Amino acid sequence: MSASSTDPIIAIATAPGRGGIGVIRVSGPDLSAWAEALCGQALRVRHAHYLPFRNQQGETLDEGLALFFPGPHSYTGEDVLELQGHGGPAVLRRVLDDCLARGAAIGLRLAQPGEFTQRAFLNERLDLAQAEAVADLIEASSTAAARSAMASLSGAFSAEIDALSERIVQLRMLVEATLDFPEEEIDFLEKYQAAKRLDAVTATLDGVLRTARQGLVLREGLHVVLAGQPNVGKSSLLNALAGEDVAIVTPIAGTTRDRVIQQIHIEGIPLHIVDTAGLRETEDTVERIGIERSWAEIARAQVILHLQDARHPDDPLDAEIVRRLPAGTPVLRVLNKVDLLEVAAPAPHGSSMVKKAGPTSASQAPSPDLGLEFGPAADEILRISARTGVGLDTLRARLLRIAGWTPGAESPWLARERHVRALEDARAHLALAREHAAHSDQVLDLFAEELRLAHESLCEITGQFTSDDLLGVIFSSFCIGK
Ligand SMILES: Nc1nc2c(ncn2[C@@H]2O[C@H](COP(=O)(O)OP(=O)(O)O)[C@@H](O)[C@H]2O)c(=O)[nH]1
Ligand SMILES: [Mg+2]
């Protein structure tokens, strides 16, 4: 952030719009005299004062509570004044403008997004992972995500990282002490069982990484694209998964012309489902543009649901679509409209799959193979009916598994992409250290260097080592007033 990090700052902290209460928050290094002048009375610390909010001309703008939290025992670590008045945009704006006018002398300015929390971080009230959890808690779209964000905020994730860091530091200290006394270097690795200790740290880190990946899924969800020929039931499937009519469904091929995105939750995991225009050759200009967009969505997908009509599973046009799907993206082949199939000619395999789906499917009773294996088997086929709902539970369970979510598994804290990347970096450095340890004592300095780099990667998570750029990126995505 460009502006000075010690200017007094002010913002409306409650959401825009109308509400029972609206809160204005001020933070700065030394606010007590100014706050008393503003409120027209001495403020007892951490005490709710009911008073009129008057402007400089003596007009009462609002009335409500004033609370003063002296630093360092406040959210930001600085002096904080909170004014709790009525939650209307105009009344809050008047109080805010008056505060700004009367704060000009002390350099009071509007806060930037996330600036209160950034100060909390700079003043060591929160570490970086906790500060991120503040934003994640506010943004959480499901109960599960909110619960995990709160755990991160209270420091559960940071504690795991700190414990790992501590063990790496201890090992480093041993190595570096040995480096200072070269004659001892020869038997260092054996004497301190360095390799064994390193293996134990690595095993712990692997566990943290696994949990972090789960936490990432919970935060980010999965980008699923419905692709297939016109009329196979893509829009119907979106509606069935969403539980409401978000996309237009008609028997007319070419109904969906532009993509429709809908967020749904399965066991608290957000899935971003994209319905696309059916893939076919067409003379219609608008439809053709829609189909180009379909292919663009398919290229961006994390999972592709290739929907087909169960009555024509071997349609050569589908083979053509499969040929054009991007390599490396998991594809679930889904045969829709099995309800029609059963009436016409019951297929022995189809009906057994259909039977499996139901309230007691894999989403509730974890089957033994719901483990670490991600991604579908290449030839797996799901049979569903978007109309009757048959097979949808199995489909939901498969999507969760592809997302890397183990049903019923704990996600004790929420994680971000950058956390997972830092853990993977740390893991890679530990693996290199292990190689050095396996080869010879002559490379003790390389061993030590890899431990140092692993430690540094972990410190990026909690923010002991971070660039201003990274802080800018993280805090600018916060809302104003937080
Ligand atoms: N019987 C039956 N009809 C379906 C099913 N899914 C979709 N349909 C019908 O197939 C037609 C095309 O569906 P739509 O969702 O618009 O297909 P899209 O073009 O792939 O988006 C509509 O008349 C739907 O009612 C299903 O599972 N069973
Ligand atoms: Mg459609």
Image (cartoon, rainbow, N blue to C red):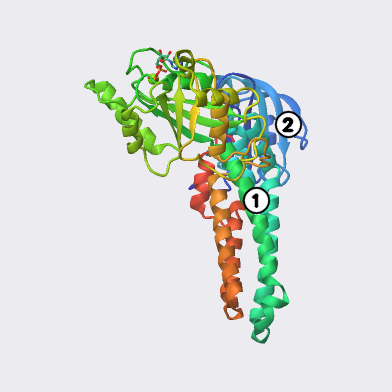
Query: In the rendering, at what x and y percent does residue 428 appear?
Result: 55, 61
Residue 208 circle label: 1
Ligand 2 has an atom within 8 Å of the beta carbon of the residue at disc 2:
no
Q: Mark 2 points at which residue?
A: 41
Q: In this view, does 279 lie above or below 125?
A: above
Instruction: Please tell me which residue is depicted at 54% across the width and 43% down the height of the picture.
Output: 374
Give whichever of discs 1 and 2 has the lower sequence position.
2
- Most foreground residue, 132 or 176: 176
Judge depth for marks 1 and 2 and give the one in front: 1
Give the quadrant of residue 445. bottom right
Query: In the rendering, at what x and y percent does residue 19 appear?
Result: 62, 19
Is residue 119 visible to the viewer in this orientation of the structure? no
Quadrant showing the C terminus: top right
Q: In this view, does 170 lie above or below 114?
A: below
Q: Is residue 275 above or below residue 2?
A: above
Instruction: Please tell me which residue is depicted at 68% across the width and 71% down the height of the picture.
Output: 194
Give amino acid for label 2. Answer: Gln
Q: Is residue 458 above or below residue 385?
A: below
Other-residue count near label 2 (Cα within 10 Å), few / some / many at <14 / 14–19 / ≥20: few
Query: In the rendering, at what x and y percent does residue 443 appear?
Result: 57, 78
Ligand 2 quadrant in view:
top left
Q: How many labels does the image show?
A: 2
Is residue 404 visible to the viewer in this orientation of the structure? yes
Give the quadrant of residue 61. top right
Query: In the rendering, at what x and y percent does residue 9 appear?
Result: 58, 39
Instruction: Please tell me which residue is depicted at 67% across the width and 39% down the height of the picture.
Output: 409
